[in-house]
Each structure stands twice: as structure tokens, then as C-alpha cells.
Amino acid sequence: MGILDRLAQPFLFAFDPERAHGLSIAALKTGLPVCSAPATNTKLKVSAAGLDFPNPLGIAAGYDKNAEVPDALLNLGFGFAECGTVTPKPQAGNPKPRIFRLMRDQAVINRLGFNNEGHARALSRLSARQGRGGIVGVNIGANRDSPDRIADYEEGVRTFAPVASYLSVNISSPNTSGLRALQDRESLSELLQRVMRARDEKAGQIGRSVPVFLKIAPDLSEKGLADIAEEVLDKKVDGLIVSNTTLSREGLSDASAKEAGGLSGKPLFDLSTMVLARMRNLVGPGLPIIGVGGVHSTETALEKIRAGADLVQLYTGMIFTGAGLPAQIVRDMATYADSNGLTSISEIRDSNLNAWLNRPLV
Ligand SMILES: Cc1cc2nc3c(=O)[nH]c(=O)nc-3n(C[C@H](O)[C@H](O)[C@H](O)COP(=O)(O)O)c2cc1C
């Protein structure tokens, strides 16, 4: 942990988690350098879904829900930033408190419920940064009270395709009741068909086919995973994000473990990596996968790649370690590539796939 993080973390921990999050966004908005981003190393470049990522580490959805600070996040060293989840209409989300730090477990439970300012606000911010470069994805969702949730995703595609490097279809938040049912085979088939059709129609207008990633939960059976893989291949979705938060509470010791919501951070690492390996095995070597869940160090970021990920994201790790974490991981990844004689970090992809496949999902 760097000197600034050593000072900033105890300060932020003095506030309740949602207030601390707001303060960290405000700090990034000032544009002041929070830490020095590492120089780009060509060995860390990754090409996936037609995009050229300067390095494989991104900030996961949920930190910058309203697209307020994507460029400041890229300046921290992240190779890409995912904004959202955004829903068509603004919504308040669930009653507070709704984010809980599990200090003993280095984890977070959240039941925010897609609190966000809606499409229009995020769109105007992203339009204003057009032309700046950098890979900025937009994660789209559905309003809680929507009469046709799939229509909300179609609207998300049409709204953000012109300003997003890629889109993520988030059907895996546990905090909007019934949302995860969109992962069931029949609903998923309809959702993906309509989303990909909206994407293709939009491509005709904007002259670019924006890649679409599907973000899934870690709480799925082997059969559920196989169904998703088949649908994703059948509908020619561009990639997967594995995974969102879990409903599991296995192995926790903090008193806040009883809170309802999705669990993220260290305890999610093993489960999300087992699911990642299964999806790599099911979809084959060609489909881009972003591995996310419990990444908190260079070693855990590398292990996601060894388990089958092309790209990696983190969120909760930064809450506990601070804003210097992405730069540190990216720097150490470059050192790792150099000292292991790699020409590209992607050469380690799948090298531990079998070990992760052999661990049973319980
Ligand atoms: C406070 C909080 C809010 C989140 N909000 C979203 C969200 O809006 N959309 C989404 O797809 N994932 C959201 N996530 C999930 C993360 O993107 C990520 O999938 C998950 O936290 C696992 O990664 P981590 O262990 O590195 O945090 C959120 C996570 C946290 C902790």
C-alpha cells in the first residue's frame, strides 16, 4: 500500500461506506493526481472483441454508476473503465444503509438496487468526453418497476452504442427482484435476440458494431452455465463477464455477514474463478471473457487469466487497499511478464484452467 493510500484509507473507513464512496468520487472529480499511473508496457496489451486494451485490468461496474469519473479512473492505471449500471429512468434504489464493509473478511455486502441517475445524465457526461480515447464500457440494466425489462436493455443499447466502447448486459444483480431469472434459458434467448438485434440496427446508423458482453452471476448450476454458454454462442454475443456478486455466505466471520445483498471481495474469489473456468471450457478459446470477483493483488489478477480470462476487473479490492491498487497491479504484471520471458501476458491464459475445473461447484 502506497503512502497516500495509507493516509486515505483510515480516513475513508471513518465514514459509512456509501458516504466514503461519495467522497472518493468527489476526490477523483477534482482531477488532482491521486497516484502516478504506470507507463504502458506492450506486453500487457490485450486485443479482445475488436478493442485494443492497453492493459488487462479494468474497474468493475458499480463504482462509477453515473459515468462521472471514467477518465480519472483510467488515470489511476486501469486499462478500461466500466460505468453503470444505468437504467432508463433515474431510481433511488433500496433504503439505506445498504452497503456493509466486512472488515474481518475483506468483503462487502451491497443491496443498492440499481440506484442511479438514469440514461440521460450518463449519456450527456459520456457525450462530453467523446474523442478523448480510452476504453469506457457502459453497463446497462432495467428499472425495477419496468413493465418490459427486456425493452429497457434494448433502450440501453440504442442510447449508449454511440458513446460506449462496449456494452455489458447486467442480468445478474441479486438486488432487483426477479432480475436473475433473465438468466433462465427461455428468457435469456429472448433477451439476447432482442439486444443483439438492437445492436445490429444501431450499427447501421453509427457505422460501428459495439461489442456486447453478458454479465452473469456466480450462483448458477452446471446446467445453468451450459444453457448460458449455448445461448451466448447461438446469439453471437461478443463476450462474457464472470461474475457479479454472490448470495453465498460461505466461510465468513464478520458480524455483518447476516446482511442481505450481494457479497463481493476476497471470499468471492474462488467461486467466481471456478465459474469463470467452467465458462471458458464451455465456450471454447475464442470468446472473450472478463474475469471479476475477489481480485485484490497482482497474484489474484494473474490467476484469473490462468483460469481462462482475457481481461480482469476489480472493485472491492480497491475499497480495502486504496486507489493505488490498479497502478501497483499493472506495474507488477509487467515485471512478471518481463521476468518470465513472456512476449504477452495472454500467454498464461488457461494455464491453470484444469485445476479450477477440477474444483467442484457445491
Ligand atoms: C457497492 C457495489 C456496487 C455494485 N454495483 C454494480 C452494478 O451497478 N452493476 C454491476 O454489474 N455490478 C455491480 N457490482 C458488482 C461488481 O461489478 C463486481 O462484479 C463484484 O463486486 C465482484 O468484484 P469484486 O470482488 O472485485 O468487487 C457492485 C459491487 C459493489 C461492491
Image (spheres, grey):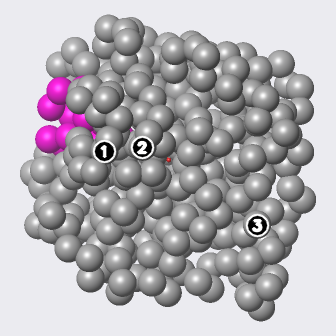
- Amino acid carrying label 1: it is Leu
Label 3 Cα crowd, 10 Å radius (few <14 / some 14-19 / many 20+): some
- Per the image, label 1 sits on a secondary structure element best described as loop
Tag 2, which secondary structure? helix
Cβ–Cβ under 8 Å for marks 3 and 2 = no
Query: Which of the pair 29/19 is nearer the observer?
Result: 19
Give SS at disc 3.
helix
Q: Residue at x 23, y 29 (%)?
A: 258
The boundaries of the magenta stretch are: 169-182
> In the rendering, which numbered label is found on residue 332?
3
Q: Is residue 170 magenta?
A: yes
Q: Is residue 248 left or right of residue 77?
A: left
Q: Distance of mark 3 from mark 1, alpha carbons?
A: 29 Å
Q: Amino acid at mark 2?
A: Asp
Query: Image quarter for residue 113?
Result: top left
Quarter in which the C terminus is drawn? bottom left
Name the amino acid, label 3: Asp
In depth, the one of 78 and 206 nearer the eye is 78
Q: Which residue is mark 2?
A: 105
Disc number for residue 252: 1
Q: Is label 1 in contact with label 2 (beta carbons under 8 Å)? A: yes
Image position, residue 284 (x, y; %): 36, 81
Sequence-first disc among 3 and 2: 2
